[in-house]
Image (cartoon, rainbow, N blue to C red):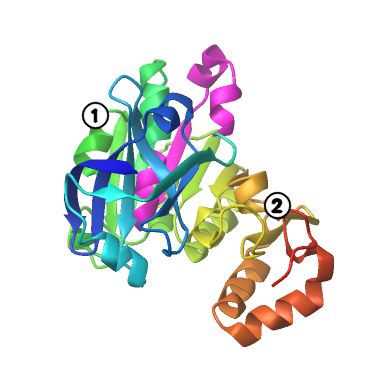
Amino acid sequence: MYKITKKRFLADNIFLMDIEAPRVAKSCYPGQFVIVKLDEKGERIPLTVCDYDREAGTVTIVVQMIGASTKMMAEYEEGDYLRDFTGPLGCRSELLDEPVEELKEKKILFVAGGLGTAPVYPQVKWLHEKGVDVDCIIGARNKSLIILEEEMKQVAKNVYVATDDGSYGFKGNVNDRIKALVNEEGKTYDLVIAIGPLIMMKFVCLLTKELGIHTIVSMNPIMVDGTGMCGACRLTVGGEVKFACVDGPEFDGHLVNFDEALKRQQMYRTEEGRAQLREKEGATHHGGCGQCGD
């Protein structure tokens, strides 16, 4: 059992929790995720690590209320317990494996869309602790959906907020803000890390490809089971089949087949679609053993 030590709402349908999980906190890194189960019969919920405190033994997660399980989770309060909190899973951010002195020479821009701000934050925080300055764009449809802005300002050199409706910060989407930074403000970047909805990451990659900026994306939005056994997060990267939960979640954004991923995500939402995918993809449908049953 894993105790909830802190809970607060960041937006109407988005909440943050600190979970007492010493073994996970001791081993996790930015870019990784955990699997949460509310009770013995509950579904597995993959959630990216937003922060961690190794001394306190806690891991911070940010949850958006979408389905029945996450809505039920929103009813849990400080002092309540989660049945399972498994992790860390997935590969840690590639940035953590680069020499710090080389990172200091790079001009890095993080692009966070909506809930994507949560997995962006620990990467920016880790870089800040190593003395690496980065810029960050936080984008959402409107002001009420902007999360973790103040926390991000503590660790990023510059934080640029963009809202589609112009209710706060720059009026326009994250791509519009990137264009303004590069074309109007004369900013140059060596690397972009984009995390958010699939459609957002697709168009960020189309733009950065035009601009000649290497781009990394996190494909955590397509994960369901978190072990590679369900086949939900199968995608094609550079012509090869990959699974976000076991091979990623981070990939070279310019090599990801976003059109295929978007179509596949839509199909996976229905039983009929899942059946069609299983039949079409055969043994490669799964990322684990490749031979397990439905």
Residue 5 relative to residue 195: left or right = left
- Please state if 16 lies on the left or on the right of 284 as rendered: left
> Magenta part of the protein: which range?
93-120
Which sits in the foreground, 110 or 183? 110
Which quarter shows the C terminus?
Answer: bottom right
- Report which residue position mark 1 lands on: 154
> In x, y percent, where is residue 155?
30, 28
Q: Determine whether the residue tagged by mark 2 lies in a helix, strand or loop.
A: loop
**Looking at the image, residue 79 lies above or below residue 51:** below
- Quadrant of the frame with the N terminus: top left
Q: Residue at x 35, y 66 (%)?
A: 69
Q: Residues within 10 Å of mark 2 (few under 14, many from 20)?
A: some
Q: Main secondary structure of the magenta part?
A: helix
Residue 233 sits above or below residue 127 on the image: below
| Mark 2, residue position | 255
Q: Earlier in the sequence, mark 2 or mark 1?
A: 1
Task: Name the residue: 61% across, 52% down.
Answer: 227
Inspect the magenta stretch and tell me whether residue 216 lies in it. Answer: no
Q: Amino acid at mark 2?
A: Leu
Mark 1 surroundings within 10 Å by alpha-carbon count, few (fewer than 14), some (14 through 19), many (20 or more): few
Q: Residue at x 78, y 59 (%)?
A: 290
Residue 32 place in picture, x, y as percent? 50, 39
Q: Residue furthest bottom?
A: 272
Q: Is residue 105 magenta?
A: yes
**Left or right of residue 287, residue 40 in this image:** left
How far apart in space, not on screen, are marks 2 and 1 (Cα)? 33 Å
Q: Amino acid at mark 1?
A: Gln
Is residue 252 visible in the rendered image? The answer is no
